[in-house]
Image (cartoon, rainbow, N blue to C red):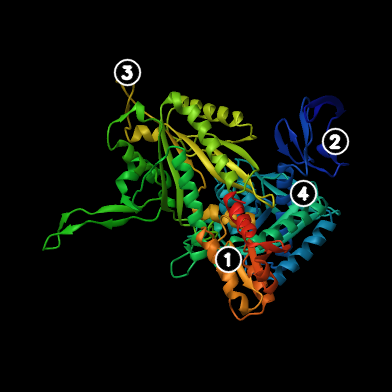
């Protein structure tokens, strides 16, 4: 018996008659670049049979979805190989993640030698080309089959309500329970796992996989739960892609801001202070000072007003803003203060909860509300370098990229509905221009829209705000990518995504519309007709935070900052002590012109001095000996190792001054 189906390839659709019982393997099995198929819009295994009228579309191995399927399949192979070695290991969760996957286990801490042994086991499993075979099971059957896996039993009990805590949705995200068997060629089951799927047809599709590291992890991300061992890995569509990724990771490791921060003496994370809390050393402080000063200058030119707010506040402020309702878990716990007691110990005056502020916007609203505002003052642009504190879990703290204390370059703009679109367009241009000044030039935008489970306000307001942001994003000429459900609870946002020197993408700036907080704080301005109106509020963080942007800049430049940001912009190295005074005079002239200079008059040999300056990534090294002094010149050595000799002093000074002025 035959059936009629539709095959889709891109925008083309072709109707085709096939035999009843035809599967995706019959359609695409000869093409190893296809790892699954979308059947009527739902991604399924290639082993799934088709029915009359079905629309089938291949899922390419190189697509984002295809890579996730490969990586999730590789996570299963990792777990299978590990349990073959550590037979008492208990299975947690193994989802795909960006560029890879992980799997959690209850097992003794793993060593690098253990990882090598697991990888050897994975190679054998892959060579066996074990099929991933899907089975639908009842809850009773699942409990019976997973009786020895306590974490799987918990997920089965959560069926339909697993959410996506630490990847739980890859196991039992829906009401249906399924188990995947890894089946050998002789039909015997080698291993099985509770899983939603889909998977690649067999393990032989996993041609480029490597384990990368291990770490401790709490079961389902909750520190009250068991501590497990997490095995990380990466998998790609081809060995060439894997090698390219590993090369990028090697380069990224060299650029790690934590490593460079130590090598260049920029900042540190003292244990005595606590995780996620950095201190800037003098050289790092100079870079940050330059970043802040230039940002202040640009904000003054753009008509911003500077404000300052305290680090701590009564809890009532965050009750009004609803941040306590939405974000209390991410805030530091309250400090109970101001309680007064009578002599007999009874309470004379009740205490109040104070919080370290996790954001600046509620305080800026109080500044706006401090007096009556006129439409003539709008748009009112308030700006602050405001330090905030968020209680990030210790497992996710990552240097200055994910910190507990950081300073936002935070702006809140209050405008009329009529001004809103033009103000957003102007804001986006301001953001992009400033990021270009710091050396970035490869951008795209994301539009984060309402999460129905996490939002406040009327649907009509959300739709109007989202559409305005969409128009502004599209009119910018940059690629605009949707981020469904990614908005904050109070309004949609556009985020600026930046690619760095090695092709990694960072979310830097955000621009968010907010009609909710003006209502909660009862903000008003007097309109031209004398009526009282609510302003539109725009949240704008340009760098995100000074610390995070500092880290991104450090990794982008691999510590070799452009001359205007470099803590030492020029260093003088005399050929011998006899020329200290000559070269010192040149350095004094540069210093008088505002250049940050050092003279290395130590007793080290000249070549060692040059190596030290090179390791410090100083933009300009000025070398002088007898011939240079006789000619009134210097030798110029650049960061890339090139050198120019006999450069007249005035010419050398002008080049340094011009390079700094041009922000190169």
Identify residue for label 4: 132
Q: Residue at x 74, y 58 (%)?
A: 246
* Nearer to me, 44 or 298: 298
2 or 3: mark nearer the eye: 3
Q: Residues within 10 Å of mark 1 (few under 14, many from 20)?
A: many
Identify residue for label 3: 529
Snapshot quadrant of residue 214: bottom right
Identify residue for label 2: 27
Q: Are marks 1 and 4 in contact (CB under 8 Å)?
A: no
Q: Residue at x 56, y 70 (%)?
A: 584
Q: Earlier in the sequence, mark 1 or mark 4?
A: 4
Q: Residues within 10 Å of mark 4 (few under 14, many from 20)?
A: many
Secondary structure of residue under mark 4:
strand
Q: Earlier in the sequence, mark 4 or mark 3?
A: 4
**Label 4 to label 3: alpha-carbon separation:** 70 Å
As drawn, the residue found furthest toward the right would be 30
**Label 2 to label 3: alpha-carbon separation:** 69 Å
Q: Earlier in the sequence, mark 2 or mark 1?
A: 2
């Amino acid at each position: 018996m035959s059936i009629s189906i539709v095959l889709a390839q891109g925008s083309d659709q072709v109707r085709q008659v096939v035999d009843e019982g035809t599967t995706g393997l019959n359609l695409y099995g000869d093409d190893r670049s296809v790892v699954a198929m979308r059947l009527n819009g739902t991604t399924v295994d290639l082993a799934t049979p088709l029915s009359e009228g079905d629309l089938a579309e291949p899922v390419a191995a190189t697509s984002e979805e295809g890579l996730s399927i490969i990586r999730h399949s590789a996570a299963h192979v990792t777990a299978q190989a590990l349990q073959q070695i550590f037979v008492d290991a208990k299975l947690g969760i193994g989802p795909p993640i960006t560029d890879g996957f992980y799997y959690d286990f209850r097992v003794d801490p793993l060593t690098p030698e253990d990882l090598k042994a697991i990888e050897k086991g994975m190679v054998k499993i892959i060579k066996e080309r074990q099929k991933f075979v899907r089975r639908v099971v009842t809850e009773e059957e699942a409990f019976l089959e997973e009786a020895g896996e306590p974490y799987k039993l918990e997920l089965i009990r959560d069926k339909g309500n697993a959410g996506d805590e630490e990847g739980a949705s890859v196991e039992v995200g829906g009401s249906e329970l399924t188990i995947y068997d890894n089946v050998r060629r002789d039909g015997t089951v080698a291993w099985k796992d509770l899983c939603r799927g889909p998977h690649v047809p067999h393990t032989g599709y996993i041609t480029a996989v490597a384990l990368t590291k291990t770490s401790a992890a709490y079961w389902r991300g909750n520190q009250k739960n068991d501590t497990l061992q997490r095995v990380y890995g990466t998998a790609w569509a081809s060995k060439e892609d894997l090698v390219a990724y590993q090369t990028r990771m090697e380069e990224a490791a060299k650029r790690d801001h934590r490593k460079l921060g130590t090598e260049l003496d920029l900042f540190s994370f003292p244990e005595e202070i606590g995780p996620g809390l950095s201190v800037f050393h003098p050289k790092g402080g100079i870079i940050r000072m330059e970043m802040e000063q230039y940002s202040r200058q640009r904000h003054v030119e753009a008509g911003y007003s500077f404000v300052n707010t305290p680090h701590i506040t009564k809890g009532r402020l965050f009750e009004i803003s609803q941040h306590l309702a939405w974000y209390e878990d991410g805030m530091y716990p309250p400090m109970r203060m101001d309680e007064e007691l009578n002599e007999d110990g009874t309470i004379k005056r009740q205490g109040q909860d104070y919080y370290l502020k996790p954001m600046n916007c509620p305080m800026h609203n109080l500044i706006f509300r401090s007096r009556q505002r006129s439409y003539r003052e709008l748009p009112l642009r308030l700006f602050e370098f405001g330090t905030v504190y968020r209680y990030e879990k210790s497992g996710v703290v990552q240097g200055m990229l994910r910190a507990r204390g950081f300073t936002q370059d935070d702006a809140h703009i209050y405008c009329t509905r009529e001004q809103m679109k033009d103000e957003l367009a102007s804001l986006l241009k301001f953001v992009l221009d400033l990021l270009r000044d710091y050396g970035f030039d490869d951008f795209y935008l994301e539009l984060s829209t309402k999460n129905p489970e996490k939002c406040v306000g009327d649907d009509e307001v959300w739709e109007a705000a989202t559409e305005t942001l969409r128009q502004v994003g599209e009119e910018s000429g940059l690629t605009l990518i949707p981020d469904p459900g990614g908005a904050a609870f109070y309004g949609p946002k556009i985020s600026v995504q930046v690619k760095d020197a090695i092709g990694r993408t960072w979310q830097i700036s955000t621009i968010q519309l907010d009609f909710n907080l003006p209502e909660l704080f009862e903000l008003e301005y007097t309109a031209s007709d004398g009526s009282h109106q609510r302003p539109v509020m725009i949240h704008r963080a340009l760098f995100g935070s000074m610390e995070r942007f500092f880290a991104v800049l450090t990794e982008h430049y691999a510590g070799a900052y452009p001359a205007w940001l470099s803590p030492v912009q020029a260093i003088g190295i005399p050929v011998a002590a006899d020329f200290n005074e000559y070269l010192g005079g040149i350095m004094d002239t540069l210093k008088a012109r505002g250049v940050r200079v050092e003279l290395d008059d130590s007793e080290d040999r000249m070549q060692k001095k040059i190596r030290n300056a090179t390791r410090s990534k100083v933009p300009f090294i000025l070398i002088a000996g007898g011939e240079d002094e006789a000619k009134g010149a210097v030798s110029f050595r650049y960061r890339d190792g090139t050198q120019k000799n006999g450069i007249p002093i005035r010419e050398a000074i002008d080049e340094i001054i011009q390079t700094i002025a041009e922000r190169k």
